[in-house]
């Protein structure tokens, strides 16, 4: 029998994301059957995160909320501060939300089509990761890593890469949480995402799980 998560992964191959219906519980069960590994956002922390609009004063350091609060977020990948960021991010919303999620596939009409591949492969960023920090490029080992909340451009190419990702927001696709029980699977290796302004919706709640796909190239 085909599993919801497997179908979403299949459906995401062309665009880099796919939406369907399901619960957080179902996502976890399917992932366990598929032998995907849940990735905690912070070392030793929980693997399920409840995302709520948060004011900067209440936010985790180096998080996007610490800088942008409940306003619109910039495009980013999740887990950019980790040595190996998660392959897949799954968002679920039990109810509905009037705050869209923005999606932008970097590999389609992205860096390569527009001649920015040099910037994302060679521009060096300083990545803050808790008490640690390390240098990384925005693209390496067939994986995108970009989060302006924790990545500071360390050279001219990285500064241009950051501008490039900022401009990409104008061509991002909107996902609307207009029906209850939606699941959105995002290929975090090639798609950037962002939340629209949630200043009008303090009660917004999205659940997030991140995974490594075991045995999948
Ligand atoms: Fe995110």
Image (tube, rainbow, N blue to C red):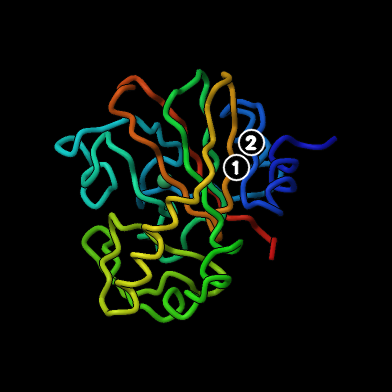
Q: Describe the element under mark 1 as helix, strand or loop.
A: strand
Give percent across and percent down for residue 141.
Answer: 54, 74
Q: Is residue 204 left or right of residue 186?
A: left
Task: Give the number of the disc on residue 156.
Answer: none
Name the residue rendered at 81%, 37% in the picture: 2
Residue placed most toward the observer, 1 or 110: 110
Q: Are marks 1 and 2 in contact (CB under 8 Å)?
A: yes
Give the mark count: 2
Q: Position of residue 120 (x, y in %)?
A: 44, 73
Compared across the picture, whether 58 is left or right of 110 comes to left
Residue 215 shown left or right of residue 110 in the figure:
right
Residue sitting at x 58%, y 20%: 179
Respond yes or no on whether mark 2 lies under 8 Å from ligand 1.
Answer: no
- Alpha-carbon neighbours of circle 1 within 10 Å: few (<14), some, or many (≥20)? many
Label drawn at residue 185: 1
Tell me the CA gap for discs 1 and 2: 6 Å
Q: Quadrant of residue 145?
A: bottom left
Above or below, comparing residue 119 to residue 21 in the picture:
below
Q: Position of residue 181 (x, y in %)?
A: 59, 22
Q: Is residue 149 left or right of residue 44?
A: left
Q: Which residue is located at x 34 percent, y 19 percent?
A: 203
- Element under label 2? strand
**Label placed on residue 19:** 2
Task: Name the quadrant of the C terminus.
Answer: bottom right
Which label's residue is closer to the chain start, 1 or 2?
A: 2
> Residue 109 or 200: which is nearer the viewer?
109
In which quadrant of the rendered image does the N terminus lie?
A: top right
| Badge 2 density bin: few <14, some 14–19, many ≥20, Cα 10 Å | many
Where does the image place residue 7, in percent across and percent down from the top left? 75, 41
């Amino acid at each position: 029998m085909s599993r919801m998560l497997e179908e979403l992964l299949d459906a995401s191959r062309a665009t880099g994301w796919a939406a369907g219906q399901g619960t957080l519980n179902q996502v976890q069960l399917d992932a366990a059957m598929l032998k995907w590994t849940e990735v905690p956002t912070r070392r030793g922390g929980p693997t399920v995160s409840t995302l709520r609009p948060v004011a900067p004063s209440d936010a985790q350091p180096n998080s996007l909320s610490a800088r942008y609060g409940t306003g619109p977020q910039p495009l980013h990948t999740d887990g950019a501060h980790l040595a190996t960021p998660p392959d897949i991010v799954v968002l679920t919303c039990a109810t509905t939300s009037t705050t869209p999620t923005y999606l932008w596939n970097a590999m389609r009409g992205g860096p390569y089509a527009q001649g920015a591949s040099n910037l994302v492969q060679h521009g060096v960023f300083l990545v803050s990761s808790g008490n640690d920090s390390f240098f990384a490029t925005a693209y390496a080992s067939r994986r995108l890593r970009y989060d302006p909340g924790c990545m500071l451009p360390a050279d001219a190419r990285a500064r241009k890469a950051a501008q490039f990702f900022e401009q990409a927001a104008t061509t991002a696709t909107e996902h609307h949480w207009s029906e209850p029980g939606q699941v959105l699977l995002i290929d975090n290796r090639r798609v950037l995402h962002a939340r629209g302004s949630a200043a009008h919706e303090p009660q917004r709640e999205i659940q997030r799980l991140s995974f490594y796909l075991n045995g999948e190239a």
